[in-house]
Amino acid sequence: MKKTPKIFALALCCCMLGGCAENNPFVQTKPDFGAGYTYSAEIKCGKLEAAADIAYYAENDWEFTFTEPKALAGMKLRINEEGLSGTLGSLNFGVDENDTYTVLPEIIARAVETLPKITADNRIVSDGVITVETEFNEKPVTITADTSGKLISLKCPFYSLNINFKEQNKIVENRS
């Protein structure tokens, strides 16, 4: 008879934990950090303030289209197996990948591409926010996302880089 209250308490505890699985530290969800997303982002790097639409098609296949400031509006930077390239209208140009501002797409791409490889042991989940610490060229990068995998922010203090992701949408069609 003494076991009945203990069993009841254990069952009640399990029910309570199961009912709030979103906040339950024992339930490990795997957010979808896979390829095939578009993002709207506000970018701050030192004195530069910009906005861009970012498309992540697959690993090493990215496109950044700047919408702000006016001087950068319409400029596209692409990352693929051949490296970083740029276009502005019909003008194609090479990009020096070692410049502070042109390294930003590379930081974003490489940091986000590490997310699917991060295990539950290598991320912190608190109040519905996942925090992941990673690196770019041995410099720390912090990424936050919600538990479904929608990006919230990316910070790289070495480059004075702060990005806030405003929108994220899954790409449903293949790119030609």
Image (spheres, rainbow, N blue to C red):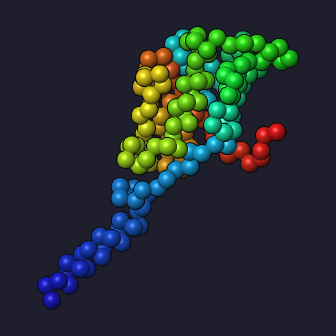
Residue farthest right in this picture: 90
Is residue 87 found left or right of 102 in the rendered image? right
What is the x, y in percent for residue 164? 55, 30
Tell me how many marks there are.
Answer: 0
Residue 82 x %, y %: 69, 24
In the rendered structure, the answer to whether residue 69 lies left or right of residue 144 reads right
Q: Quadrant of the N terminus?
A: bottom left
Locate residue 63: give its quadrant.
top right
Residue 70, picture quadrant: top right
What residue do we see at 55% from left, 39% from top? Answer: 151
The residue sitting at the bottom extreme is 1
Residue 64: in sight, yes or no? no
Instruction: Tell me which residue sits at (42%, 39%) in the image.
Output: 131
Residue lying at the far left in this picture: please name it.
2
Given residues 101 and 127, the one toward you in this image is 101
Q: Residue 140 placed where, x, y %?
A: 42, 25
- Image quadrant occupied by the C terminus: top right
Residue 36's place in the image compared with 74, above or below, is below
Which residue lies at the image location 73% right of the left edge and 22% below the top edge? 76
Quick one: which residue is furthest to the front in this view? 82
Q: Is residue 112 visible?
A: yes
| Residue 140 located left or right of residue 54 | left
Image position, residue 80 (x, y; %): 68, 28
Residue for point 35% across, 55% down: 25
From the viewer's side, name the closer residue of 80 and 109: 80
